Amino acid sequence: MDLLNIEYEKYKLKNGLEVILHKDDNLPLVAVNLWYRVGSANEKQGGTGMAHLFEHMMFQGSENIPKEMHFKYIQEAGGSLNGSTNFDRTNYYEKLPSNFLELALWLESDRMGFFLQALTQEKLDNQKSVVINERLERYDNQPYGLAWEILLSNLYPLYHPYSWPTIGLIDDISRFTLDEVSAFFKRYYSPSNASVTVAGNFDEKFVKENIEKYFSEIPDSIERVEINSSSVKLESEKLITREENVQLERIYLAWSSEKAYGNDDAALDILADILSGSKNSRLYKNLVYEKELAQDVSAYHYSGKLAGHFMIIATVKKEKSPDTIKDEIFKELGMIEKNGITERELKKTKNNIRSGFIFSLQNLDAMANQLNYYNYFLNEPNSFNYDLNRYNMVTIDKIKSVTNDYFSKPYIELRVKPKK
């Protein structure tokens, strides 16, 4: 079998739930990975943070599972579990010994089909407080913690679904009612809006019987709300300055870029790695080592289902100038636009990407999640070769082209300065 050609089976239950099975008998373990096609992009202004709140609420018990017992059952079986939320989706995942596979399927099915029966005002109030405290700790009271929120709200138009943070705004979270939470669940947490991947050491007859047993009778919601996203086009550059309780100034530059699997997505990923992916990368070597202007520097390309953004961030060393750092960044981008990159740089980054692909296949959790990821974006779980070939096809001329196309356009600049 080709290392990147993953064998799997995909089918659909009568209620619309997609099932993806990948058998791997190397270890006596199994991973269960469930994606709901709902993230913060499915929210609206004034109601932000609902999807992330559900990441917490879904561990608070369902009709047959008491509060907090989801964690207890899995951990006592020798397994691990968690969930995460981003703009486009929410996922829940477990990895545990194969003989406890039925336990994981039962737990996931019970909260998919019977969550509302156990929802109470007390649980909602409790988790609203937990999320608000999380936001205060990780964002509002964290040095540079609001930078991403400020950048996104200025980079994307006001009502674009990527313009607010996934964790939500405190005022919105505080106002959520039990009826609003129930309506959100009914709208998005139904079988036809989800896919479950089971990867690892399992008996195929057993897993199919139990998926049918636990999931097939869950009724599907017929309500769907399509996301309408406006185009992302900055008309002019914008400089934002902010004073915080920080030791060093930090400069952020943000551009609109490409959505996931768009024509320029792979090239922008490669460019980000060439700029800051290692200590020998262009910006890191120039700004941190050679000229000692920056404490650190990073370039980051995010591509979502609806849009993307490219950011360059540098922490300014004491008594050094952020203007000088900015000039050096644009000088480097200008050199790439004019002269391109070297064959060595391109080959090194492509090799790193291929190594990352191969490493991900050795991790059962990552494998299960990647199958769901490809299924969500490409409707084909076995897209490893397709994905890798996108990067293999990137040329030096393509890197020059995307540098010209994206970084000659207006951008958002944020400077976070120490309080005087």
Image (cartoon, rainbow, N blue to C red):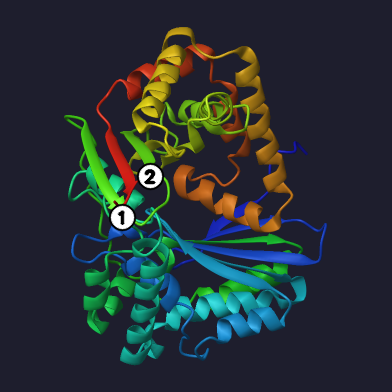
Question: Local crowd at mark 1 within 10 Å, few (<14), some, or many (≥20)?
Answer: many
Residue type at mark 1 is Ala
Q: Position of residue 409 (x, y in %)?
A: 27, 24
Whether residue 399 is visible, yes or no, is yes
Residue nearest the viewer, comparing 320 with 222? 320
Q: Position of residue 282 (x, y in %)?
A: 54, 23
On screen, residue 116 above or below 420: below
Residue type at mark 2 is Lys
Residue drawn at (55%, 26%) of the image: 274
Q: Which residue is mark 2?
A: 305
On screen, residue 147 above or below 302: below
In the figure, is residue 293 to the left or right of 306? right
Question: Local crowd at mark 2 within 10 Å, few (<14), some, or many (≥20)?
Answer: some
The label on residue 41 is 1
Which of the 4 image quadrants contains residue 343? top right
Q: Position of residue 346 (x, y in %)?
A: 60, 20
Which of the 4 image quadrants contains residue 414? top left
Q: Are marks 2 and 1 in contact (CB under 8 Å)?
A: yes
Q: Position of residue 277 (x, y in %)?
A: 58, 33
Residue drawn at (24%, 27%) of the image: 410
Which of the 4 image quadrants contains residue 134? bottom left
Residue nearest the viewer, comparing 141 with 201? 141
**For marks 2 and 1 on the same chain, the one whose residue lies earlier in the sequence:** 1
Residue drawn at (20%, 42%) of the image: 230
Whether residue 91 is visible, yes or no, is no
Residue nearest the viewer, comparing 75 with 297? 297
Q: Quadrant of the N terminus?
A: top right
